[in-house]
Amino acid sequence: MAERSAISQASQIGVETTAGTLVAAPKRLGSMGFKMGPAIESNPLRPAGTKYSTAQILGKEWTEADIDGMPVYTELPYAFASVLSTPTIVQILDGATQTGAYRHTFTSNTYGDDAPKTYTIEQGSSFRAQRFGNAIFTEYNWGWSRSQIELSGSVLGKAIEDGITLTATPTMLPQIPVRPADLSVYLDTSAANLGNTKLTRVLKGECNIGDRYSPLWVVDSAQSSFVNTVEQVPTVEFKMTQMADAAGMANLTSMRGGTPKFLRLRGIGPNIYTSGAPLVVNHQVTIDLCGSVSDVSSFDEEDGVYAVEWTFAAVHDPTWGKAINVEVITTTASL
């Protein structure tokens, strides 16, 4: 008798046209894994005078998935399109010449609704497989240092469907990793100057986007799970551990004055296009945030130096018109 091997449980993804309406999942992601499973709320039936429940009554059923992996430039649009909003995609041209590069710009509307992408996610093998729809990234985190970049986060979806057949012959995008050596960190006083001042003693950090969506439950026997998701007050943070030198301790003044700062984490990867002009286009990811200090750690040793961690919470800047902006340049033309 054959057994269901854990190492063969591949994940595939498809972009839904209408949230919750299942579609084929023709893309296999190489950078993100989904540890998925059913989640429920049930109520015990235990009448007065009984020691043990006589039944468990199912109330709500949905799917939860944890994300793990490491980022690659070509697949980043799938995550940011869901946890932030559908991107504006512009092909980068060299005059009339196509460069093969596309700029994906993601932002979140402070005063209105965002338009996130949802997915159908399939997982399994020819032995057995499951899928769920209305999959949306509720949390997406980067933990970064010079050693590695780690992805984590959470996906919420409708009730799982078991015993499905995986979408045949899925394709995988080129795997162009975002390497730790690609990254630089910047801190400036205005959006207009964002990216001018590089910090040279940042030891590690995090970019965290969380608490994005919650499910909407209605009393309707035709619905086997939640009917839609609703935006919540997000938690968006930029953390960095700096050597406690003059540059690192300058954040103390900003903290005491409640002065917002503009932070940037940028990764520049391999070349996509170079012309004689010269126009040079590389794979690139840029995470920009307007933030105010919301927390600070105790001083501690990090890699042999005296260091401190600063946490900046996203705040809306009226001149910039937003609190966070993400840009990805890569060869992925569309989701």
Image (cartoon, rainbow, N blue to C red):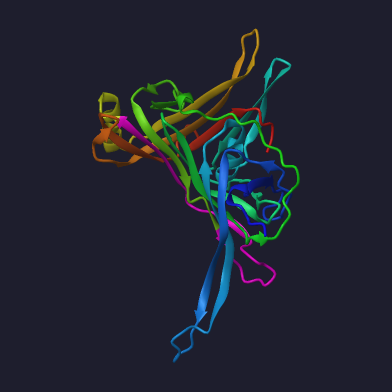
In magenta segment, residue 186: no
In magenta segment, residue 218: yes
Q: Is residue 200 above or below residue 55?
A: above
Give coordinates of residue 214: x percent, y percent: 53, 57
Name the residue furthest right: 168
Give coordinates of residue 283: x percent, y percent: 58, 25
Q: Which residues are magenta?
A: 215-242
The residue closer to the viewer here, 95 or 266, is 266
The residue closer to the viewer here, 55 or 324, is 55
Name the residue furthest bottom: 49
* Residue drawn 52% across the image and 23% down it: 268
* Residue drawn 59% across the image and 29% down it: 176
* Residue drawn 49% across the image and 33% down it: 287
Residue 65 in view of the camera: yes
> Is 58 on the left or on the right of 22, as rendered?
left
The image quadrant that residue 98 belongs to is top right
The residue closer to the viewer here, 149 or 104, is 149
* Residue drawn 59% across the image and 45% down it: 82
The image quadrant that residue 109 belongs to is top right
Give coordinates of residue 163: x percent, y percent: 70, 60
Q: Is residue 137 above or below residue 181?
A: below
The image quadrant that residue 184 belongs to is top left
Give coordinates of residue 310: x percent, y percent: 32, 37
Q: Is residue 306 above or below residue 63?
A: above
Q: Is residue 278 above or below residue 60?
A: above
